[in-house]
Image (spheres, rainbow, N blue to C red):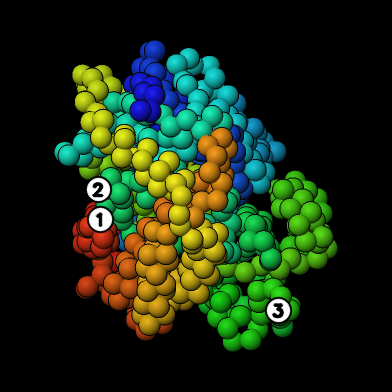
Amino acid sequence: MAREVIHDVLILGSGLAGLRAAVEIARRVEGADIGLVSKVQLMRAHSVCAEGGTGAVLREDLGDSLDLHAWDTVKGSDFLADQDVVYRFVEQSPKEIHQLDRWGLPWSRTEDGHILQRDFGGHSYPRATMAADKTGFFEMQTLYDTLQQHGGCARYDEVFASRILVNDEGRFLGLSVIDMASGEMLTLRGRALLIATGGAGTLYGFTTYSDTVSGDGLAMAYRAGLALEDTEFIQFHPTGLIPSGILMTEGCRGEGGYLRNNQGERFMQHYAASKMELAPRDIISRAMMTEILEGRGFHQDGELDHLQLDMTHLGAERIHQRLPLIREVAMKFIGMDPVDTPVPVRPVAHYSMGGIETDIDGACTAPGIWAAGEAACVSLHGANRLGTNSTAECLVWGAICGEKIAGFLGEEPGLPDLPADLVAAEESRIFEGLLGPGGSASPFEIRHQLRDAMDQHLGVYRDGASMQQGLDKVRELKAAFKDVQVEDKSRVYNTNLVRALELENLLDLAEVAVASALAREESRGAHARTDFPDRDDDNWLKHTLVRQAGDGLDIRYKPVAITHWEPVERKY
């Protein structure tokens, strides 16, 4: 039987949202016993990869405003964002920036000492609050340092969660986890859980995500009976470096970089003349794919067709000061110096607008469970996220969830009973099932085929026939997984086992995403259908909700909260 360890609260995921929540709980509850669970070393969470900035209104004296940030976000979402959520976000985000400043984050500064902000796509004011082009890293470092000032936080590094344990009423009971260093299965108990595991970008082969971002929290929540919301909306960032997909931050264009086709033309003038390279990401990604599909891309044997990101006119000093990481990455990975050479880029899978359904406070429908950051869908981003709003969301709802969980700990009397059969069933599934004898399917081959299917059938442009082929393929791969073979039968640092468990999660999420996209017969934001090219507010101004129903899916819908602006045609 798995050894049981008890904490007040469990935080699953150690990125920006998880760390911000941990700090908030520690600040509010003296002696709070927090279990911080991460499948990687704590500071290796994908949040360190955030580069360009964090969105916040800091200069109302120079013309920015909360209303303007809210409008930009709602319009950028193609009017699918819940507007009450958007207003809460824009009001709280500046407070988080100033809080991090007090905690010691080394923001970039103007000559007169103000925190430096730059332009970003879809924003009508430069509000991308930046620490050069390493913003996520410095935010993570600052939160981690701040957390060290509080006691009571137990770290579970390199511990893989395989199941969220809930009772028949859906009440949270604990987590089944595998300690990779010992191979031991543990049962972590807590009165509350925060899911902050990030997105699911490794569904795709060409992606900006770290290889560990496999949607674990979303899949476990789905299997625990929670709904996944708006998963058809997957953002493609315009500038993924060829051939790796490494992110070339939107800050490159915020600093004045150009996108060019094989004729040397700044082609965005044909798609969003008023914004050019600073249009929202969905619009630019569609424009880039159109250029490539119509033959105006660059072709090189063995590589994806691409366009160019040209920063040569910015000058060495500006690139050294504002984009040092980008220059380092380009030089190390493709041997090109962006100071004097345009770099090859193409739209790349980058972000999940959808996630676990929550209310405006980040609470899930299951008692005792909250979700924050990219794993959650509080309905802030709608059909398309504006750059810089993701790290800001992690900070805002990390703090909100931390506050709500702190209050919950003061009210909730104790731990509900945990039926022994739940734990035993999970142990048997992993150690007798996946690590048992038999099985012939290769998890690595299934994962390769899954990524190919997602790249091919759920890309920037999609249509019903192709998505149906994709859904059929995903279900074929799900069936094949039932006969999967994990060759390494050991328990200590069994990365083959982890890969198989991640694959199981990705297969569930792929089915939900493709089925949701196939059902939505319109084009909105990042969901661009060639067979339904127009936005359809009469029939599709609503959020998709998907729950597991036996071996199938239960797809339902709920309304969008419209409190300020009715949808209008989206032009830039």
| Nearer the observer, 364 or 10 | 10
Residue 340 shows up from this direction: yes
The numbered dot on residue 373 is: none
Q: Secondary structure at mark 2?
A: loop
Residue sitting farthest toward the top:
31
The tag earlier along the polypeptide, 3 or 1, is: 3
Q: Which residue is mark 2?
A: 225
Labels in figure, total: 3
Horizontal side of 384 relative to 315 (left or right) equals left
Q: Are marks 2 and 1 in contact (CB under 8 Å)?
A: yes
Q: Which residue is mark 3?
A: 298
The residue at the point 52 percent across, 60 percent down is: 442
Residue 63 position in % (x across, y down): 49, 49
Q: Residues within 10 Å of mark 2 (few under 14, many from 20)?
A: some
Residue 511 position in % (x across, y down): 36, 64
Looking at the image, residue 43 lies above or below residue 65: above
Q: Which residue is mark 1?
A: 547
Which part of the image, by quadrant, shows the N terminus? top left
